[in-house]
């Protein structure tokens, strides 16, 4: 028995030595956020396959979330940014192009600073609310954008699941538009009295068409010419900031930075069809979709030996019989 007990003790000691602590999860979260900032994000984006994420990572970003009847016939990534490649490109590569061209009046700034507003850790889950500072070179100003983050880490401290909510981001874009559109108009040689929607449409069209014609060739070709691109995009809605996953120009412009990284994947997202990203969305389907394999349900004390993925039962609504029983009890109390 002694050799067995000795072996067991050694294994137990080794397990305790390598057990992850809350500090480990905090450091992993801190490292992720640090890499999100410029210029660190450029190196991460260029890797295409960042080990910040698990290979089979699943994730969503609220304003970019897509879900429609197409989900029945398309791959799972039609619902979100799953897998290391897509997670790396969308969460990090999206901001790199802006940093490379300081004269571009893009509505999407460069993340340069942050501070925590809230942070909660229950291993292996981390929930954080972070106020990022996004720098806009043409305006020489930094705008705060709060992002609520849910992480599930695996045993290697890689992000296994993520859910990001850009709180009030649409409001920020709406406020910035009047300041950015004069620079967009100047860049496109449009009269300064041109309406804001017209300037935005022209700016997005220019970005989308130029990128598609430069990188989408051969089997990835989307448009026959710039004129063809303009004509086809002219039939699309401009879009709204909070619906950046819909079949509109806002969505296609958002995918422009990813096209040079992997044309074979992203060309269709700036094309006429929108691929499996810029698609018509159904509100109820988006809200009710259960995308995550595990969810973000931390263990409660009474669930320690049970299934952490099962949610606590909710109280049942009262029935007519319950109400009658209650009335009878009240009557008995009055008689007493």
Image (cartoon, rainbow, N blue to C red):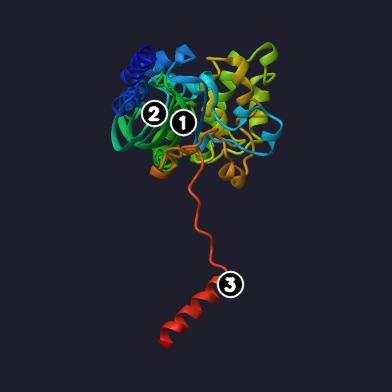
- Give the class, few, some or many, for how many residues have Cα within 10 Å of label 2's Cα (few <14, many ≥20): many
Q: Residue 211: horizontal and vertical position, in percent?
A: 56, 19
**Relative to 321, does residue 23 appear above or below in the rendering?**
above
Q: Earlier in the sequence, mark 1 or mark 3?
A: 1
Q: Which residue is mark 2?
A: 109
Under circle 3, the secondary element is helix
Q: Nearer the viewer, residue 160 or 190?
A: 160
**Relative to 256, does residue 62 appear above or below in the rendering?**
below
Nearest-to-viewer mark from 1 and 3: 3
- Give the class, few, some or many, for how many residues have Cα within 10 Å of label 1's Cα (few <14, many ≥20): many
Quote the CA–CA distance across marks 1 and 3. 43 Å
Q: Quadrant of the N terminus?
A: top left
Note whether residue 78 is visible.
yes
Q: Earlier in the sequence, mark 2 or mark 1?
A: 2
Note whether residue 137 is visible.
no
Q: Are marks 2 and 3 in contact (CB under 8 Å)?
A: no
Nearest-to-viewer mark from 2 and 1: 1
Quote the CA–CA distance across marks 2 and 1. 22 Å
Indicate which disc residue 320 carries.
3
Indicate which disc residue 162 carries.
1
Q: Quadrant of the C terminus?
A: bottom left
Residue name at image x 50 percent, y 51 percent: 313
Q: Is residue 59 left or right of residue 333?
A: right
Residue name at image x 47 percent, y 78 percent: 329
Q: Nearer the viewer, residue 213 or 94?
A: 94
Q: Residue 216: horizontal and vertical position, in percent?
A: 63, 15
Q: Nearer the viewer, residue 176 or 336?
A: 336
């Amino acid at each position: 028995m002694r050799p067995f007990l000795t072996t067991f003790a050694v294994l137990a000691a080794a397990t305790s030595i390598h057990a992850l602590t809350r500090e480990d999860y905090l450091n992993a979260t801190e490292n992720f956020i640090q890499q999100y900032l410029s210029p660190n994000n450029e190196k991460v984006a260029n890797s295409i396959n960042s080990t910040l994420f698990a290979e089979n990572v699943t994730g969503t970003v609220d304003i970019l979330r897509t879900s429609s009847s197409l989900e029945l016939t398309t791959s799972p990534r039609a619902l979100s940014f799953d897998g290391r490649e897509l997670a790396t490109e969308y969460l990090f590569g999206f901001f790199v192009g802006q940093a490379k061209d300081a004269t571009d009046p893009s509505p999407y700034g460069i993340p340069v600073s942050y501070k925590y507003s809230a942070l909660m850790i229950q291993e292996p889950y981390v929930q954080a609310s972070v106020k990022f500072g996004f720098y806009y070179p043409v305006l020489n100003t930094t705008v705060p954008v709060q992002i609520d983050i849910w992480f599930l880490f695996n045993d290697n401290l890689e992000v296994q699941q993520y859910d990001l909510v850009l709180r009030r981001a649409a409001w920020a874009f709406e406020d910035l538009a009047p300041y950015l559109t004069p620079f967009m108009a100047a860049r496109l040689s449009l009269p300064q009295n041109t309406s804001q929607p017209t300037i935005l449409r022209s700016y997005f069209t220019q970005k989308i068409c130029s990128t598609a014609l430069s990188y989408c060739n051969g089997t990835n070709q989307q448009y026959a010419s710039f004129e063809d691109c303009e004509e086809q995009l002219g039939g699309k809605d401009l879009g709204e900031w909070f619906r950046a996953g819909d079949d509109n120009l806002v969505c296609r412009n958002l995918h422009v930075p990813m096209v040079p990284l992997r044309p074979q994947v992203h060309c269709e997202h700036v094309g006429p069809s929108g691929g499996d990203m810029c698609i018509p969305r159904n509100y109820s389907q988006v809200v009710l979709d259960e995308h995550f394999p595990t969810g973000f349900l931390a263990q409660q004390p009474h669930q320690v030996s049970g299934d952490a993925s099962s949610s606590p039962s909710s109280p049942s609504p009262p029935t007519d019989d319950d109400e009658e029983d209650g009335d009878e009890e009240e009557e008995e109390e009055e008689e007493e």
